[in-house]
Image (cartoon, grey):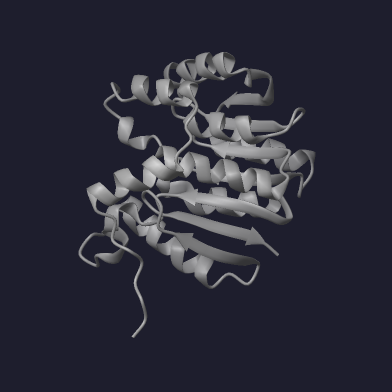
Amino acid sequence: MSSKTLCITADLYEYMLSVSLREPDVLRELRAETAHDEKANMQISPEQGQFMGLLVKLLGAERTLDIGVYTGYSSLCIGLALPQGGRVVACDVNREWTDIARRYWRKAGVEEKIELRLAPARQTLEHLLERGPQTFDFAFIDADKINYDTYYEYCLQLIRPGGLIAIDNVLWDGAVADSAINDAETVAIRALNRKIHADPRVEISLVPIADGLGLVRKI
């Protein structure tokens, strides 16, 4: 019988954070401010942000993409993990949310590392690709789910061999495993999960952290 991933209870989750999370004050403050927004559930969890920062350091990444900024938590985690001279190209369309992001990037001293592109992500990725493929080390996809496949394909072209793509919400609160749920977003995530599983261009792991984080290493 195969073993299953441990079911995290509320008490065990709190214990896990107590012995593993090292969240800087600036990130904690950003989470607290974002919690007042009606869309606050879009923000990644602190343990996921810390995990992605670790991945960025392990990769030795210098050029990164953040597709879907919201109030800037993921960009800030990546920016803090990057070396001096490192760069995050951050893609979003909402000025109100990204104004909050800019304020915290500035407070954390990483504003110069983060280049915000206020435009549809597809447009930004197309422009970046025109400059040349395989120029990024790491990408994080956490934007509109309907276009996840499009962002994935652009990232595969923009990421260097050995680079990493991290895709958020791939478990979609369990909806992907429920055949009775077939709204457009669920269908899009479900289809991308299957596509990645069969994709010979990459090596993969789906990590059950937060709402599911798909890790894709370009071969």
The C terminus appears in which quarter of the rendering?
Answer: bottom right
Q: Nearer the viewer, residue 188 or 57?
A: 57
Quadrant of the rendered structure where residue 132 is? top right
Q: Nearer the viewer, residue 62 or 150?
A: 62
In the rendered structure, the answer to whether residue 123 lies left or right of residue 47 reads right
Residue 80 visible in the displayed image: yes
Q: Is residue 125 above or below residue 133?
A: above
Quadrant of the rendered structure where residue 108 is? top right
In the rendered structure, the answer to whether residue 92 lies left or right of residue 30 reads right
Image x and y of residue 211, in percent:
36, 50
Q: Residue at x 42, y 37 (%)?
A: 46
Image x and y of residue 110, in percent:
63, 21
Q: Nearer the viewer, residue 19 or 164?
A: 19
Image x and y of residue 182, in percent:
26, 59
Quadrant of the rendered structure where residue 30 is? top left
The N terminus appears in which quarter of the rendering?
Answer: bottom left
Q: Is residue 91 above or below residue 48?
A: above
In the rendered structure, the answer to whether residue 217 lies left or right of residue 101 reads right
Work out which residue is located at the far front of the displayed protein and give it. 19
Q: Is residue 21 above or below residue 26?
A: below
Q: Residue at x 42, y 63 (%)?
A: 191
